Amino acid sequence: MNHDERNIQRLKDKILSLGPMLPGSIRKQFNVCGKPGCKCKDPVSPAKHGPYYQLSFSVAGKSSSFFIKEKDLPEARRRIKRFKQFRQLTQELTQSNVDLTRKNGFTRSSS
């Protein structure tokens, strides 16, 4: 295995070791309910409900979102960070495969 092939294998190993991941971003929000006389509708000092945390993302061109409990925020942020690492590593892997194919042709491309 030459240097290029070792690099490709290293990138694959890193991708496989990332663990659970999620695309998207987290947004903190506060809401107003529909109950008459609720504290969230106070004309002088409204106290909105929340905070609520929502993960928004797209997969296969479809946008979606879901709420995350505050206690789960640290893990959700770790998973988003892993997804960003995954995207970077897959770009590097793609470029490495292109470079190897340019160098050696199709007879010695990494699998």
Image: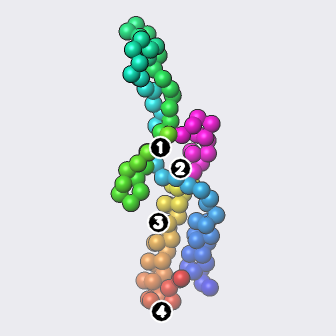
- Decide: marks 2, 3 in contact (CB < 8 A)? no
The quadrant where residue 40 appears:
top left
* Residue located beneath label 1 in the image: 66
Residue located 58% across and 35% down the image: 70
Magenta highlight on residue 76: yes
Residue located 59% across and 48% down the image: 78
Q: Disc 2 vs disc 3: which is toward the camera?
A: 2
Q: Disc 1 vs disc 4: which is toward the camera?
A: 1
* Residue located beneath label 4 in the image: 107
**CA distance separating discs 2 and 4:** 37 Å
Residue located 49% across and 74% down the image: 96
Q: Disc 1 vs disc 3: which is toward the camera?
A: 1
64 and 28: which is toward the camera? 64
**CA distance separating discs 4 and 3:** 22 Å
Q: Position of residue 14 (x, y in %)?
A: 61, 66
Which quarter shows the N terminus? bottom right
